[in-house]
Amino acid sequence: MDENATPSPPVEETARAAWQPLTFGGVAAFARAGLSRLLGVQVLVAGGVALSAVWFLAAAWLPTIEQAIHRLPEQGAIRHGQLQWPGDSPTRLAQGLFLSVVVDLDASAPTDHTADVQLEFGRREIRLHSLLGYWAVPYPKGWLIAFNRAELEPWWGAWHPALLAGLAVAVLLGLLVSWALLALPYSVPIWRLARWTGRDVDRAGCWRVASMAQTPAALLMAVAIVLYSQHQLGLVHLLALWLVHWVVGWIYMIGAALRLPRRTETSSFLINPFSGRANPRNPFSRKGKSGKADDKEK
């Protein structure tokens, strides 16, 4: 091995340096970090994204939902897959910049595009209108669901904190699982790039790099969601950033792969012939002290 070659940092030193995923070198450091450190940093990032999602719902959707519940009639229910509505139709229950809630039994009214998302209760289905299109979900036929102010107001007041907490946990776990699963195919091009450029990393290290390289893109989306909830970004800009965040992940994967330490064995054939040291891979080089002793005896 060449004495002039720069040795790779030890595993312990690299693991201690792996603490932030904001730079290419920071992501590359996780190639030799322990699984607990990797998971710990990812939990922090996923927790930030989950908090941004809860922040958005609390600031943008919850006031509109509470207004809609307050304007419900005293009687009403969804029974046998059909909405029993005693009031007029169509009726707008609540209107906001992000969400509007409408009761339109026969889909007779045109869609209002003043809100980014319109939630529409029909006779046999709930309809969701947005910039992405139209989505309808039939009511469950075997359930009895209250659709009146007397029952929904106390239920919503008691359970909406638990619903927000459940959403935060679902986002956190969903991100951790998706990062781990997406890292399986993503690690293949990282492994090939590392082999081609002579990087010192194994397949498990490539998986860790691929998994951690997705966290900067997630942080980008967390910031975008907060800005969207504060009217600093529109829905079109939010969707554009969602597309961009996939590109950001790949940029970090390539950049981190190129910041991995190089293999010292790659320079073993390039030993200086005037250095007085033999190449261990050269079959014609003299090996060891025994060969020198034999030459002296001759």
Image (spheres, rainbow, N blue to C red):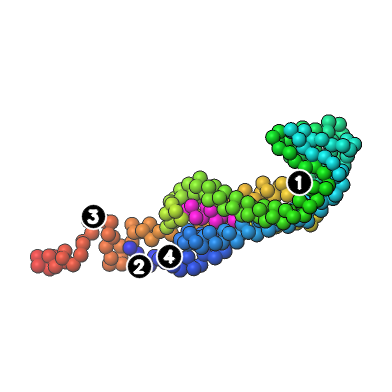
Question: What amino acid is at disc 3?
Answer: Pro
Please check the rendered image and state whether residue 159 is part of the magenta-colored stretch, yes or no.
Answer: no
Return the residue at label 1. Answer: 236
Question: What amino acid is at disc 1?
Answer: Val
Query: Quadrant of the rendered structure where residue 293 is?
Result: bottom left
Question: What amino acid is at disc 4?
Answer: Val
**For this rendering, which residue is in front, 111 or 16?**
111
Q: How many marks?
A: 4
Return the residue at label 3. Answer: 283
Q: CA distance from mark 4 to mark 3?
A: 33 Å
Q: Are marks 3 and 1 in contact (CB under 8 Å)?
A: no
The image shows residue 109 at horizontal and vertical percentages of 87, 34
Q: Residue at x 51, y 45 (%)?
A: 185
Q: Residue at x 61, y 57 (%)?
A: 46
Return the residue at label 4. Answer: 11
The image shows residue 106 at horizontal and vertical percentages of 83, 31
Name the N-terminal-most of marks 2 and 1: 2
Residue sticking out furthest to the left: 298
Dot in front, 3 or 1: 1
Query: Quadrant of the rendered structure where residue 53 is?
Result: bottom right
Q: CA distance from mark 2 to mark 3?
A: 20 Å
Question: What amino acid is at disc 2?
Answer: Glu
The image shows residue 58 at horizontal and vertical percentages of 76, 56
From the image, which quarter does the C terminus lie in? Answer: bottom left
Q: CA distance from mark 2 to mark 1?
A: 57 Å
Q: CA distance from mark 4 to mark 1?
A: 45 Å
Specify start and end residues of the magenta stretch as a single range.
Answer: 206-215
The image shows residue 130 at horizontal and vertical percentages of 77, 41
Residue sticking out furthest to the right: 88
Q: Is residue 92 visible?
A: yes
Dot in front, 4 or 2: 4
Return the residue at label 2. Answer: 3
